[in-house]
Amino acid sequence: MPRPAMRTLLLLVLHVFASSLSISGASAEDKKPDEKKPGAPKVVVVLPLGVEAGTTNQLTIRGLDLTNATRVRFIGAAETIEARITAREPGGKLDGFDAAKVGDQKLVVEFVAPAEAAPGFEVVVTSALGDSTPHAVAMVPAGRLVAEKEPDDGFRDAQEVRPGQTVRGLIASPDDVDVFAVQVEAGRTLRAEVRAERLGGTLDGSLTLYSDKGQILATNDDSVGRDPSVGFRVTVTGRYLIALSSVTEKAAATHAYLLDVTVPP
């Protein structure tokens, strides 16, 4: 092959090689992950899940893009209620849960719940990038909210509750079982209902209703979404037991719940 032709061929090969390096470099650059840009706040769970009307409360709001919040307010009552932000913190990793489900940031706020319980009560977090979607927080009438108290993990240690009360509790470990005892008259229907998932909690609970002698009367896993409820028409006046546990082998601070115990006419 004449030398000019060889030189031309060599230049062509070098040009192709240089082009491939350029393309390869651009591809590598394209594959670099984009840095997450902050967006409007997102609230995924508020702990505790419910408050009592007319009381001063401290709440932990977990979610995404929260630490730049400028305002937290509660809507749905007679008037909008402003909350005071007392802390802005990383959410911390909760084993077994994606950040989209439990949040990776949190705000701690204080506010006074109105004296009259409202049917709709929601929290909204505001930053320079917008407002969060309203997130429900339960409000229980004054005098009806009771805290779960350990130990309450067996029939002998069952926590006494009264019809009409709401228990605010936490399934603290995968094998934790919370047991409650209630006195019911014959001819009445005992109902127990959990509110957890519908308020942003991660608990997938199971409810079982027992007689005082340990006989299973009713059981339920899922009723409203993953929130269980049970009901039983009582034929013998006496003490009845309600047991709540988790159906998954997980435990987290977000395994909170509200247990409504009622005896409707």
Image (tube, rainbow, N blue to C red):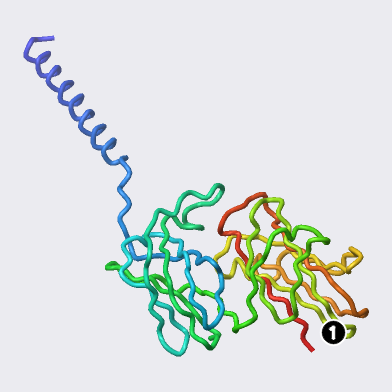
Residue shown at 69% from the left, 57% from the top: 246
Q: Residues within 10 Å of mark 1 (few under 14, many from 20)?
A: some
Quadrant of res 203: bottom right
Residue shown at 55% from the left, 47% from the top: 95
Residue shown at 38% from the left, 70% from the top: 125
Is residue 34 placed above or below 110 in the rendered structure?
A: above
Quadrant location, the C terminus: bottom right
Q: Is residue 66 left or right of residue 225?
A: left
Q: What is the x, y in percent for residue 56?
A: 48, 76
Q: Secondary structure at mark 1?
A: loop
Q: What is the x, y in percent for residue 1?
A: 13, 9
Quadrant of res 141: bottom right
Q: How many marks?
A: 1
Q: Amino acid at mark 1?
A: Arg
Give the labeled residue for mark 1. 188
Q: What is the x, y in percent for residue 42?
A: 41, 65
Q: Is residue 243 left or right of residue 53?
A: right
Q: Is residue 4 left or right of residue 219?
A: left
Q: What is the x, y in percent for residue 16?
A: 19, 26
Residue shown at 14% from the left, 18% from the top: 9
Of 200 and 149, which appears nearest the observer? 149
Is residue 207 placed above or below 140 in the rendered structure?
A: above
